[in-house]
């Protein structure tokens, strides 16, 4: 079957819309017709070369759509089902899957690293040339093929463009606060980066009962959005020293939790530097592959500070996404406010330009 898809041929280049061939789904696989795919920073890191990925590949990892057809042996979904695509494949049985951390499953690492499905081959080609999968999902394509385990069935009446955002921005952000940091009621929180992930960290911290949530960003438009998601204070990092501002706002004490939702080592340092004693700095943004970070080793001991990270909201998506859908429906989770723009797939490069300039909070490309 033919499909229009956005391909990255090499880092530093723009995405190119091409007509690729998508193979039929094999045993245990499903073919999904995408309806909406989120424009997430992670793909941008691959485009700039900060994050390694096997290329050429069809990017996109935050997608939702409708099952078109299924391969032999598929039982959990059928054609016509609405699904969210899960960007970290998990086997369901290993140590990490059993311990509620399916994002750490070796199967996911393998698929992410190879750009191919578990049998070692790709389902995409262009004029006979192999095109790789990205994150096992490749959501910037009209059609994609992925393992059954990576497609989560959702109710038919949930708008698919909102559902797409649940598959990455919402679960990653909310999960970082709720699952990974386990923010305590009454605590103080700083969130660096008020993009699609950051505002969801803000929202997660508020849901967990934080009393102070300070959002930090370079764009006032994003800081306003962060207030909409419950931030009690905002700091524009282009006009002030964010660490000093956070210390000032907390009476010199620092915060109990600082989340880094940008993916830059210098901001990881700032997150660590604004902590109170026993504070936890949680890296959520995707840092450049080879980057390192330096922090005060004495603060680790004398102040018992913690520096750690969270992948995919440290969540169990198949359990947590249905819960989030219920929360959205009962008014407890903001989702409509997150989706600020829509672009046709042909304008995907413009969508990324708008993300870089801070014009969009979260946008989706539609097919
Ligand atoms: Cu993402």
Image (cartoon, grey):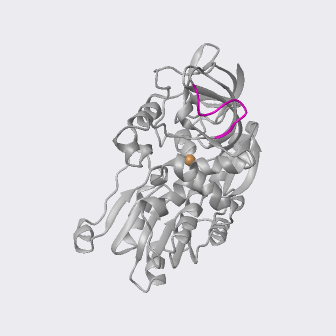
Q: Any magenta on residue 75?
A: yes
Q: Position of residue 209 (x, y in %)?
A: 52, 74
Q: Residue drawn 67% across and 70% down?
A: 228
Residue farthest along the front direction in this orientation: 75
Quadrant occupied by the C terminus: top right
Which residue appears at 53% of the width and 58% of the height?
Answer: 173
Q: Is 341 left or right of 122, judged from the image as shown?
A: right
Residue in the picture at 51% in, 70% down:
208
Q: Is residue 11 visible?
A: no
Which residues are drawn in magenta? 74-83
For the N terminus, which image quadrant? top right
In this view, 119 is above or below 214: above
Residue 119 x, y percent position in the rendering: 46, 21
Asked if residue 302 lies left or right of residue 146, the reply is left
- Residue 342 forms part of the magenta stretch: no
Point out the residue furthest to the top here: 128
Q: Quadrant of residue 67?
A: top right
Which of the 4 image quadrants contains residue 199? bottom right
User: Where does the image place residue 308, in percent across and percent down from the top left?
Assistant: 36, 58
Instruction: Say which quarter of the image contains residue 331.
Output: bottom right
Residue sticking out furthest to the bottom:
251
Q: How many marks?
A: 0
Q: Can residue 222 be seen?
A: yes
The foreground one among 24 and 91 is 91
Q: Main secondary structure of the magenta part?
A: loop
Please state the horizontal and vertical placement of residue 122, each as a whole percent of the image.
Answer: 54, 22
Q: Quick one: 331 or 177, which is closer to the camera?
A: 331
Q: Residue at x 45, y 59 (%)?
A: 179
């Amino acid at each position: 079957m033919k499909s229009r898809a956005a391909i990255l041929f090499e880092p530093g280049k723009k995405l190119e819309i091409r007509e690729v061939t998508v193979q039929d789904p094999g045993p245990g696989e499903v073919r999904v017709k995408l309806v909406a795919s989120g424009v997430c920073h992670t793909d941008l890191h691959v485009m700039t070369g900060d994050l390694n990925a096997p290329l050429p590949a069809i990017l996109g990892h935050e997608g939702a759509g409708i099952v078109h057809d299924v391969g032999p042996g598929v039982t959990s979904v059928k054609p016509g089902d609405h699904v969210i695509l899960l960007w970290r494949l998990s086997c369901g049985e290993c140590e990490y899957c059993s311990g509620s951390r399916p994002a750490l499953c070796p199967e996911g690492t393998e698929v992410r690293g190879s750009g191919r499905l578990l049998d070692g081959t790709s389902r995409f080609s262009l004029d006979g040339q192999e095109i790789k999968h990205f994150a096992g999902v490749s959501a910037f394509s009209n059609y994609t093929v992925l393992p059954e385990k990576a497609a989560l069935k959702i109710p038919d009446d949930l708008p698919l463009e909102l559902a797409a955002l649940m598959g990455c921005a919402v679960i990653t952000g909310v999960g970082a606060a709720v699952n990974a940091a386990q923010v305590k009621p009454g605590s103080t929180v700083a969130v660096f980066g008020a993009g699609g992930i950051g505002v969801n960290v803000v929202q997660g911290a508020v849901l967990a009962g934080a009393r102070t949530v300070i959002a930090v960003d370079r764009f006032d438009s994003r800081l306003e959005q962060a207030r909409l998601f419950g931030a009690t204070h905002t700091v524009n990092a282009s006009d002030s020293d964010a660490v000093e501002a956070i210390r000032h706002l907390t009476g010199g004490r620092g915060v109990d939790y600082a989340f880094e939702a940008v993916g830059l080592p210098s901001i990881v340092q700032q997150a660590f530097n604004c902590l109170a004693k026993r504070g936890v700095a949680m890296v959520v943004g995707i840092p450049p592959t080879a980057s390192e970070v330096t922090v005060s080793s004495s603060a680790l001991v004398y102040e018992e500070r913690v520096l750690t990270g969270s992948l995919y909201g440290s969540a169990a998506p198949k359990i947590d996404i249905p819960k989030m859908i219920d929360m959205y429906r009962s008014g407890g989770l903001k989702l409509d406010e997150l989706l600020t723009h829509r672009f046709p797939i042909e304008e995907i490069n413009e969508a990324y330009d708008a993300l870089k300039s801070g014009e969009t909070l979260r946008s989706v490309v539609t097919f």
